[in-house]
Image: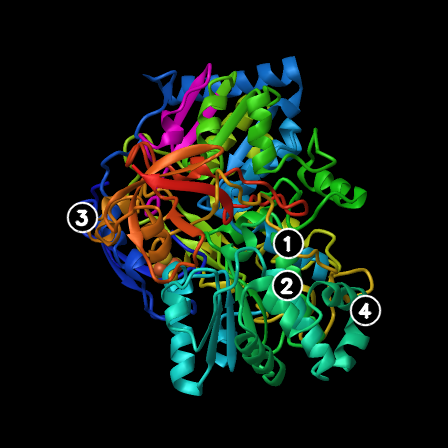
């Protein structure tokens, strides 16, 4: 890590999807001073607690620094040989679809692109999915159903320019803090009203002008009621609906069957009629409304319908693609968007293309791919179930910790033992995933933030550079270089002869523009010939960046009412009535909701290094309503066992006024490495949404008792 002190390097925060610009100034001792980049349009110099503590997380403690095979240190040559040999053997014996890749929203776009290309074009396996499946795949599916494309219509400026911001299933104050600051600023500047919809009254709810603490899983009823209200009070934009959409009648008829009036909406959601009426009236009379939604919507067995119920209300009022108006998916991870762009989800091929025969053929020709896949692969939950069943024989995990974060995490750790080949590319030596073992286990040391170099895309379609400002420690390498070296050993050297990340970015940008006549939303063709020097110095860019018509970096899409469906019209979706995928029972009478805390990120492999961040919440906990705590004999600060049909965890009790009766909340950050009894991922079943495949993580039937 140690190198000479240097000038500040502009890079991007590796945590949430806000994608804040960071100035990192290496101190010559392996560390760096950290400040917000005042020129970055996501944050204009601000950083939240996690971002500002990045300098405290750069030590090499716990880093994976050398390759190993079956626990024995190995050379890169033999480790890569073991990976290539193992993949070849599994493909020969069981076929290529016995191979799976599990990627990460932490990977850079260039890493993601190369992994996806190797799997889907050259190995010929469709089973490439990512932890982004757990993050925003329901938003992707809702976008595609409504717009014909996975397009986030708006931009961060909309938050500055809205008169009402509705936050659904989002503790924005903790999980997207810099965007929340923008919202608070908008309130101070223009009187923006903040409506927060969440079963739990978090800090975000505390700051709301109107807080709606609905029953878990009832969002489709609330937004169906809103659609009915908009129609019955003359608040629809019929000109927009007639000219630019289709399907309102069906969606409205379904909405009327779910929530015909405010009284029925109240009965379905557990809210009061007066507060519902207040929300509906505010939405109906305000032109500039942004509805921002996050994991409370997405991490649900009905997540796609929830997203479409929200989008329906914006289409019905024409509030989309306009300044200060639109539905807005807040992405959890730093590069979930980049992963979508390259096709890192199992239901995508590449560059926002899917599996229409002409799309498959186009990608095949562009890559000169010998084994292009022709259909979708298994999504995360199904993929790991296939590992359990022995259908997947080889699994390569990159930059993520599914043994902690996946639902049924204990079962996944067990299932890995049966793999013929288990490969983990990681920066951390002792993550639960790196510590798990298959019949043959290969650990490959990957570069971490500050060492790697490439691009990420944030929630508003803005591509920013993550730049290297520290030397790679030990034998750590870039993920794209590791994957390319395996590809070369499998005989695909020519297609993976990348000299640097810039070359990969150029190829990715070229594919986005290849035979793209404007029917595909993702297009960054205008930078497909970017030079190495320009790539090194490039400023944040918002897509689309198309060569056609030189339309560079549009802030908003759909302002012209033109969508990416064949007839250019957006679609209303008739959503299903709310129902919990797993109802509570006598044995499991509580509803367990999982999520994050303010100062930790995912499984704490980075934030856990900062004492300051760890001080915020230092032990795994469960939050419970005071009356429920009293009824169960639990006291604040005591210990409780939370159990579900899938596992149990011992957690510290936090009695919280913000909880609904009957609900529990636990954060998923802790692992076997940090709190062996506190693995909350092991508690959830994770029943997937039938459209998106995103697992339910917000409503697991649970029991609680003093430990
Ligand atoms: Fe990083 Fe997100 Fe905080 Fe910005 S808001 S500094 S991207 S964690």
Tell me the CA gap for discs 3 and 4: 65 Å
| Crowding near the residue tagged with mark 1, few <14, some 14–19, many ≥20 C-alpha atoms within 10 Å | many
| Residue 423 within the magenta-colored segment of the rendering | yes
Mark 3 sits on what residue? 28
| Tag 1 residue | 304
Query: Considering depth in this image, is 325 or 697 the residue closer to the camera?
Result: 697
Q: Earlier in the sequence, mark 3 or mark 4?
A: 3
Q: Is residue 546 visible?
A: no
Gap in angstroms between the C-alphas marked 3 and 2: 57 Å
Q: Are marks 1 and 3 in contact (CB under 8 Å)?
A: no
Quadrant in the picture for the N terminus = top left
Q: Considering the numbered disc 4 on the image, is that residue within a helix, a strand or a loop?
A: helix
Q: Position of residue 306 (x, y in %)?
A: 62, 58
Looking at the image, which residue is at 38% across and 73% down? 207
SS state under label 1 = helix
Residue occupied by mark 2: 221
């Amino acid at each position: 890590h140690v190198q000479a002190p240097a000038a500040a390097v502009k890079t991007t925060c590796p945590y949430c999807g806000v994608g804040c610009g960071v100035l990192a100034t290496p101190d010559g001792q392996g560390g760096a001073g950290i400040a917000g980049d005042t020129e970055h349009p996501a944050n204009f110099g601000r950083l939240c607690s996690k971002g500002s503590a990045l300098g405290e997380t750069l030590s090499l403690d716990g880093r994976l620094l050398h390759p190993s095979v079956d626990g024995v240190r190995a050379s890169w040559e033999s480790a890569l040989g073991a990976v290539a040999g193992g993949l070849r053997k599994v493909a020969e014996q069981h076929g290529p679809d016995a191979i799976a890749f599990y990627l990460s929203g932490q990977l850079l776009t260039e890493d993601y692109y190369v992994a996806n290309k190797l799997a889907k074009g050259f190995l010929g396996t469709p089973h490439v999915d990512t932890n982004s499946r757990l993050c925003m795949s329901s938003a992707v599916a809702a976008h595609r159903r409504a717009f014909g494309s996975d397009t986030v219509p708006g931009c961060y400026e909309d938050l500055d320019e809205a008169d009402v911001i509705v936050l659904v299933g989002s503790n924005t104050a903790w999980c997207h803090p810099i965007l929340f600051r923008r919202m608070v600023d908008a309130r101070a500047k223009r009187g923006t009203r903040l409506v927060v919809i969440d079963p739990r009254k978090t800090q975000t709810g505390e700051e709301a002008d109107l807080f709606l603490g609905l029953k878990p899983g009832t969002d489709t009823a609330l937004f169906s009621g809103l659609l009915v209200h908009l129609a019955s009070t003359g608040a629809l934009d019929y000109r927009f609906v007639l000219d630019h959409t289709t399907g309102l009648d069906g969606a409205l008829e379904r909405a009327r069957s779910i929530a015909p009036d405010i009284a029925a909406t109240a009965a379905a959601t557990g809210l009061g009629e007066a507060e519902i009426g207040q929300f509906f009236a505010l939405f109906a009379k305000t032109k500039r409304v942004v509805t921002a939604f996050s994991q409370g919507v997405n991490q649900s067995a009905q997540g796609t319908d929830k997203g479409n119920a929200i989008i329906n209300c914006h289409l019905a009022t024409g509030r989309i693609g306009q300044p200060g108006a639109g539905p807005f998916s807040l992405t959890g991870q730093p590069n979930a968007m980049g992963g979508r762009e390259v096709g890192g989800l199992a239901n995508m091929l590449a560059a926002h293309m899917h599996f229409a025969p002409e799309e498959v053929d186009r990608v095949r020709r562009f890559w000169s791919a010998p084994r292009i896949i022709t259909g979708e692969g298994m999504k995360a939950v199904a993929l790991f179930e296939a590992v359990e069943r022995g259908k997947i024989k080889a699994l390569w995990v990159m930059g993520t910790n599914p043994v902690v974060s996946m639902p049924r995490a204990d079962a996944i750790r067990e299932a890995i033992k049966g793999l013929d080949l288990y490969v983990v590319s990681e920066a951390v030596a002792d993550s639960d995933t790196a510590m798990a073992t298959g019949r043959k286990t290969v650990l490959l040391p990957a570069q971490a933030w500050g060492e790697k170099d490439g691009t990420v895309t944030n929630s508003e379609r803005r591509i920013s550079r993550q730049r290297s400002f520290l030397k790679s420690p030990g034998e750590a390498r870039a993920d794209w270089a590791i994957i390319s070296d395996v590809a070369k050993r499998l005989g695909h050297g020519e297609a993976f002869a990348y000299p640097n990340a810039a070359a990969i970015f150029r190829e990715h940008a070229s594919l986005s523009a290849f035979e793209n006549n404007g029917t595909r939303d993702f297009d960054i063709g205008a930078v497909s010939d970017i030079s190495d020097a320009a790539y090194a110095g490039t400023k944040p860019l918002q897509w689309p960046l198309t060569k056609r018509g030189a339309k560079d970096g549009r802030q908003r899409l759909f302002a012209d009412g033109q969508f990416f469906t064949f007839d250019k019209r957006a679609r209303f979706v008739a959503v299903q009535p709310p129902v919990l995928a797993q109802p509570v029972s006598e044995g499991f009478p509580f509803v367990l909701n999982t999520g994050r805390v303010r100062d930790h990120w995912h499984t704490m492999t980075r934030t856990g290094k900062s004492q300051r961040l760890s001080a915020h919440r230092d032990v795994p906990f469960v939050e419970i309503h005071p009356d429920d705590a009293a009824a169960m004999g639990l006291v604040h600060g005591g210990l409780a066992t939370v159990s579900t049909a899938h596992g149990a965890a011992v957690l510290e009790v936090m009695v919280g006024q913000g909880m609904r009766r009957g609900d529990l909340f636990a954060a998923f950050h802790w692992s076997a490495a940090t709190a062996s009894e506190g693995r909350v991922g092991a508690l959830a079943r994770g029943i997937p949404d039938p459209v998106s495949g995103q697992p339910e993580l917000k409503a697991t039937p649970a029991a609680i008792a003093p430990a």
